[in-house]
């Protein structure tokens, strides 16, 4: 038993000597100040590189600025659409057919026959006819109706206008007004 204790003691001493040796070697060989600074600089540059890389990843790329699309005229405010686009375009189309418009304007008044208050485009085509294009609200996609009459007469019928169309456009409104006037043989021959 003594022998095994002695062997253990020797092993412990040997281990202890080795660890002391390595510790003492580390102590005996101090790091140079230059080496320390280089390591410090190295770690700073590594960390700054990591930060730069992280910032490049985290920072979203600048979006490519697309030229802003102009708002479609049908999406513009109601009165702007009617007064600046629909009325001038409708006037031009009617004039191209050899007819003259005496008066055309948008008013918030009573709809012919029904007498309910709404937005109405009143148009008087010289020596041909009058028509009233009515919008229930100040929105081109609201319910619409049209009434027609010969000059110096009152309209006798209100007809729904563009009720099945999902997308109302300037060209569609103009073509359907002209189609309606042509259907009554007011602006041309069928």
Image: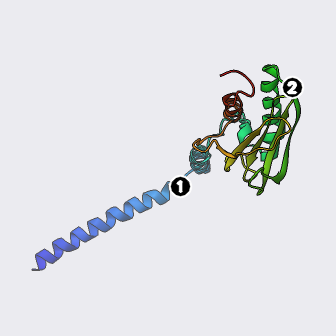
Q: Which residue lies at the image location 27% right of the left edge and 65% below the top edge? A: 14
Q: Which residue lies at the image location 42% right of the left edge and 62% below the top edge? A: 23
Q: Say if mark 2 contacts mark 1, CB within 8 Å.
A: no
Q: Which residue lies at the image location 53% right of the left edge and 55% below the top edge? A: 30
Neighbour tally class for label 2: few under 14, some 14-19, many 20 plus, Cα within 10 Å: some
- Residue extending farthest to the left is 1
Instruction: Tell which tag, 2 or 1, sits nearer the viewer.
Output: 2
| 120 sits left or right of 55 in the view | right
Percent from the top left, x then y, of residue 89? Answer: 79, 30
Q: Nearer the viewer, residue 45 or 32?
A: 45
* Image quadrant in which you'd find residue 70: top right
Neighbour tally class for label 1: few under 14, some 14-19, many 20 plus, Cα within 10 Å: few
* Image quadrant in which you'd find residue 106: top right
* Image quadrant in which you'd find residue 183: top right
Percent from the top left, x then y, of residue 153? Answer: 82, 40
Q: Which residue is mark 1?
A: 30
- Residue extending farthest to the right is 102
Q: Which residue is mark 2?
A: 100
Q: Is residue 115 above or below residue 8?
A: above
Q: Is residue 88 above or below residue 79?
A: above
Q: Nearer the viewer, residue 21 or 70?
A: 70
């Amino acid at each position: 038993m003594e022998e095994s204790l002695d062997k253990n003691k020797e092993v412990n001493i040997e281990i202890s000597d080795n660890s002391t040796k390595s510790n003492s070697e580390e102590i005996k060989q101090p790091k140079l100040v230059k080496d320390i600074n280089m390591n410090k600089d190295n770690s700073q540059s590594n960390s700054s590189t990591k930060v730069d890389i992280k910032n490049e990843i985290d920072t979203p790329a600048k979006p490519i600025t697309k030229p802003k699309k102009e708002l479609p005229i049908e999406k513009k405010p109601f009165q702007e659409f009617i007064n600046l686009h629909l009325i001038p375009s409708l006037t031009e189309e009617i004039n191209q057919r050899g007819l003259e418009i005496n008066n055309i304007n948008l008013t918030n008044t009573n709809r012919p026959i029904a007498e309910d208050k709404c937005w109405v485009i009143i148009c008087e085509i010289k020596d041909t006819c009058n028509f009233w294009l009515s919008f229930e609200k100040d929105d081109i996609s609201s319910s619409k109706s049209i009434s027609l009459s010969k000059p110096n007469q009152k309209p006798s019928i209100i007809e729904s206008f563009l009720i099945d169309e999902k997308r109302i456009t300037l060209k569609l409104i103009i073509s359907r007004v002209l189609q309606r006037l042509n259907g009554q043989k007011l602006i041309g021959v069928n």
